[in-house]
Amino acid sequence: MSAITSPAPATAAAPASNRLALTGVGFAVLFIASLVFSGLAGSTTYPSPFEADKVAEAYFADNGGVVLGMGILQLLSAVPLAAFVLALTKGAARAGLVRAAGLCAAAGLAACALIGLAIPVLDASGDTLHTLHYLTFMAGGPAHVPFLGIVVGASALAFRTSAPRWTTVLGLTSAGLALLSLATFVSESLMLLLPLGRFTAILWILVTAVRAARLRK
């Protein structure tokens, strides 16, 4: 599973599998940790940019340190995500689309984290707060999830002959949900597609990382 096409020779398979395992698990753990930290340490749930302005203002005023911690964890998670994609496509033919989509997904996540970090650092309020809050959603949602879905869907198809059938179905389902989440640009009522696409993609990445770790043995 070291490439999008056929498996690499045995001498190269172990290091590649090691990178897939470490980076895949690293991304999932850091990203999920950011959400768990926010949920446990925050005074309330992280607000949607579509809620009333006073809700967001109250949250960010009371949870500056939480927002900083969540942003740092998400920024860190973008690094193993990029490394996972590079390991996934290393030495593969016709892997340009997957590699480009993966790097765009990592860039979107990093942008989301950096913009989010700017809110407590700048002590933003009013229109500035609303703009930054909305940009974090756009960067980490519609600008990140569809690209992540492309990585997962294309890779699931490439591995369909060597991976369990259910992982292929999971990957393609995740890709479909992630691409459909682009509809959130049109209607906020479809926002549920974003977490569905995101977390099924993370699950596929975890499964792939675990399978890569088993290949080392």
Image (cartoon, rainbow, N blue to C red):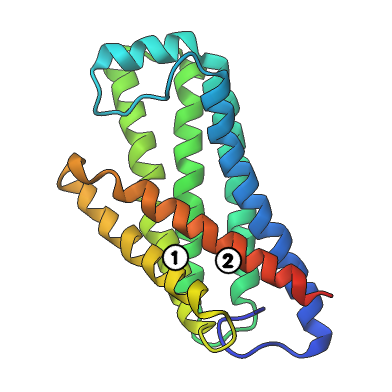
The numbered dot on residue 61 is none
From the viewer's perspective, tell me whether residue 125 is left or right of residue 169: left
Residue 130: % across, % down: 29, 22
Looking at the rendered structure, the kind of residue marked 1 is Ala
Residue 110: % across, % down: 51, 44
List the residue tagged with mark 1.
101
Please tell me which residue is depicted at 15% across the width and 47% down the height of the picture.
186
The correct choice, above or below, for 22 with respect to 89 in the image is above
List the residue tagged with mark 2.
85
Residue 189: % across, % down: 18, 41
- Report the residue that reaches farthest toward the left: 186
Residue 89: % across, % down: 59, 76
Please tell me which residue is depicted at 74% across the width and 72% down the height of the picture.
17
Q: Helix, strand, or loop for circle 1?
A: helix
Q: Where on the picture, by quarter, is residue 2?
A: bottom right
Visible residue check, residue 34: yes
The correct choice, above or below, for 89 with respect to 107 in the image is below
Sequence-first disc among 1 and 2: 2
Looking at the rendered structure, the kind of residue marked 2 is Val
Number of numbered tags placed on the structure image: 2
Q: Are marks 1 and 2 in contact (CB under 8 Å)?
A: yes
The residue carrying pointer 2 sits among few (fewer than 14), some (14 to 19) or many (20 or more) residues within 10 Å by Cα, namely many
